[in-house]
Amino acid sequence: MISLGEFRIGRAVEHEGPFVRPEDFFPDWDPAVLEESRDWIGPVMDPASGQMILSFHAFVLRTARHTVVVDTCLGNDKERPLRPVGHQRKGDFLATLAAAGARPEEVDFVMCTHLHWDHVGWNTRLADGRWVPTFPNARYVMARREYEHMDALHARGDKRMHASAFVDSVQPIVRAERALLVDDDYQLEDGVWLEAMSGVSRRRFVEQHADTGNLVMPAHFCAPSAGRIVDRTKAFGFVSV
Ligand SMILES: [Zn+2]
């Protein structure tokens, strides 16, 4: 549990392990960069498989007013045949989440950072053959622009993984009238707001926070998933805390 002023932040991990080869993930991947960074980058690679180690986790943010879950990871019972880690899972993530400070009925907001399959899975759970909201009292915050994009993909018959996640983990939330479709600069309360991230703005984010000591808690970074960005001249580094 991390304390930031009046906020408390817990982390709930659903899965951590080798996931994807960097050359399959980054279009301009250059192995020399990893080699040059080897003495400080830490254990991000699995030597046996050559894959990057990824964490799939949620953050539980408790403010004075709200309990917020940021991202809902993989989910149980979802059909993800192309991603074994997420395919027909039978896990106990809700117990992990409760231990991190959020039982389903206590959650006021679910913030979906984006609508990819590995960030919306526990939005819903299977009950009597239907997908129902896992967090019965929560409003689910989603970017309106992204929702409309995914909706259009689905309408065109797209059957890829993000589109199937849209069907089983996003549409049921909208149909249950639990979705809060928001603008890119939505503010949930003082100190909790969204910023849109594209390639350019992500770069700006890293530059803006490097060497400031600001705490950054990213998706997919392995335990403890919290650290500070440092400028290493030829690259940016991440120092875990
Ligand atoms: Zn992801």
Image (spheres, grey):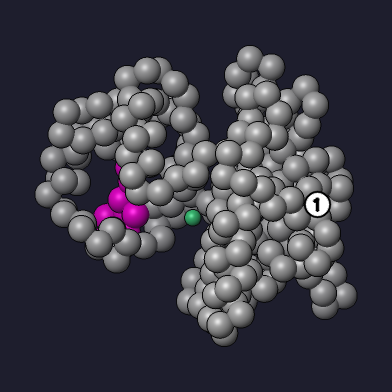
Residue 94 in sight here: no
Disc 1 crowd, CA 10 A, few/some/many (<14, 14-19, 20+): many
176 or 57: nearer the viewer: 176
Left or right placement of residue 69 versus residue 148 in this view: right
Left or right placement of residue 198 versus residue 144 in this view: left
235 or 81: nearer the viewer: 235
Give the residue number, with chain letter if any, for mark 1.
Answer: 135
Q: Position of residue 140 (x, y in %)?
A: 73, 50
The verdict on label 1 being within 8 Å of ligand 1 is no
Q: Residue at x 21, y 57 (%)?
A: 29
Screen quadrant of the C terminus: top left
Image: 112 above or below 41: below
Q: Residue at x 80, y 51 (%)?
A: 135
Q: Position of residue 200 (x, y in %)?
A: 33, 44
Q: Quadrant of residue 96?
A: top right
Residues in magenta, as a range: 43-52
Left or right placement of residue 163 versus residue 99 in this view: left
Q: Position of residue 100 (x, y in %)?
A: 69, 37
203 or 94: nearer the viewer: 203
Image: 102 above or below 90: above
Q: Residue at x 39, y 52 (%)?
A: 53
Left or right placement of residue 222 versus residue 159 in this view: left
Does the magenta-highlighted stretch encompass residue 49? yes
Numbered label tally:
1
Does the magenta-highlighted stretch encompass residue 14? no
Q: Residue at x 81, y 55 (%)?
A: 178
Screen quadrant of the N terminus: top right
Magenta stretch secondary structure, dominant: loop
Q: Position of residue 101 (x, y in %)?
A: 74, 35
Q: Amino acid at mark 1?
A: Phe
